[in-house]
Amino acid sequence: MPRSSNFLVVAAFDLGTTYSGYAYSYKYDPTKIITNRNWYPGDAASKLLTLKTPTSVLLDTNGQFHSFGFEAEDHFAILAEQNENDGWRLFRRFKMTLHNNQLMSRQATVKDIGGVDYPAIDLFAMAIQYLHKHLLDALKLKLTGLLETDIQYVITVPAIWDISAKQFMREGAIKAGIEGDRLELAFESEVAAIWCTHELSSDAIKSRMQSPGSKYIVIDLGGGTADISVHQILPNGFVKALYKATGGAWGGTFVDQNFMEFLEQLLGKGVMEQFRTEQLGDFFEMIRDFETKKRSNSIFKRMVCPFRIPPSLSEMVSATNKHVYYAT
C-alpha cells in the first residue's frame, strides 16, 4: 500500500448502525480534524446533538438510488403520508447485517422497512458512494486542483467484527469507487482511543496514556454494538491490542427498541402501528428527539426526562378513550 505521506488529505468514513458521517484532515495540519456540519433533519436541526446523518438509503420505483440520510427518511415520509410510496424502498439501520451474519457473502441480503430483501453489497456500496461524493464536493470547495488520488481513505469498523464482515465492508467501498490501494480499515475503538489522548485528557492523563507500556481499556458503546478492548502503547507510539476484543449486539438501538415497546404498552400497540403508518414523518421526528434525549448528559443528572408526544400521536391515543396530558 502507498505510504500515507504521499497523500494530501486523509479522510475517514464512519458508516454506523444509526448514524453515518465523515471527517478529514490535511497533511500539513493532521491533528486539525474537519467534520461536515451540514446535515439538516427537517425542522429539528437545532435540536440534534450530532454531526452525522441517519444510515438510511432510499431507492426509487426503478430500484435506483434516490437519497441518503435525513433526506431519504424525510422524502419517504412525505410520500407515505400522501399514499404515494408504492414501489419506493427505504432501508434503515442495516449495518447490523454484518454483525448478525456469521459468514457474510456477496449473496447476503438486507430488508427494507417493508420486509423485502435487497442485495447487501449494493446497499453498502450506495451508502459509501454517497458519503464519498459528499466529501469530494466539500473538498473541491476548499482545495483547488486537488485530485481524487491525493486522498487516502479510512473506514472504521467495530473491533468485534469477524474477518468476513471486514472484507465485506472493504468490497463495498471498492464497489463504491474507492481504490483498494488507497483504503484502510481501522478499528473504531483504536481510533477513539487515539482521539481521546489528543483531545480529552488532562496533561497528566495524556502523558500517562502516551507513555510506552501504558495499558488502558476502551469501551465503545455504538448504535449497534458494544466493544470492549484492552490496548498497550508500544515504544514507537503505535497501539497494540493485548486481547481479542469482546462485546456484542448491545448498542443504543436496543435502548430505542425498549422505548418503543414501552410506548406500545402505554399507548397501545395498534395506536403505535397506526402512527408509524399514517404519520411517518412525525414518527421519525419523535425518534430523533428521543435520540437527542438519550445522548444528553442531563438524563443522568435527574430522575425525570421531559419528552413531548407529537400532537398527531396524542389525537390517535384520544380516539381510544385514553388521554395524553402535558406536564407544565
Image: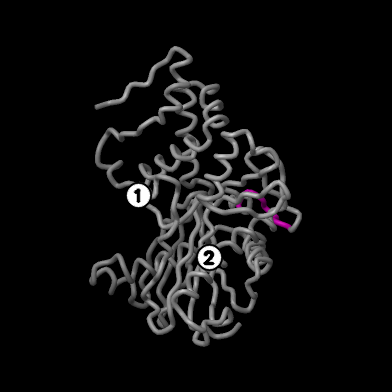
Give the labeled residue for mark 2: 134
Depth check, front residue: 129 or 229: 129
Q: Is residue 100 magenta?
A: yes
Q: Nearer the viewer, residue 189 or 321?
A: 321
- Left or right of 172? Residue 201 is left
In the rendered image, residue 284, in percent from the top left (x then y), is placed at: 49, 40
Instruction: Report which quarter residue 132 is drawn in.
Output: bottom right
Image vertical order of residue 52 relative to residue 277, above or below = below
- Report the residue that reaches farthest toward the top: 321
Q: Position of residue 219 (x, y in %)?
A: 42, 56
Q: Name the kind of residue labelled 1 in the image.
A: Ser
Picture quadrant where residue 127 is located: bottom right
Residue 285 image offset from top left, x and y in percent: 45, 40
Which amino acid lies under the numbered mark 2 shown in the image of this protein?
A: His
Residue 46 badge: 1
Magenta residues?
99-105
Q: Nearer the viewer, residue 322 or 107?
A: 322
- The quadrant in which the N terminus is found is bottom right
Q: Give the vertical position of 13 relative to 16 (above or below).
A: below
Farthest residue, direction right: 107
Can residue 311 be seen in the rendering of this structure? yes
Query: In the drawing, does residue 292 fall left or right of residue 202?
Result: right
The residue under the point 73% across, 57% down is: 105
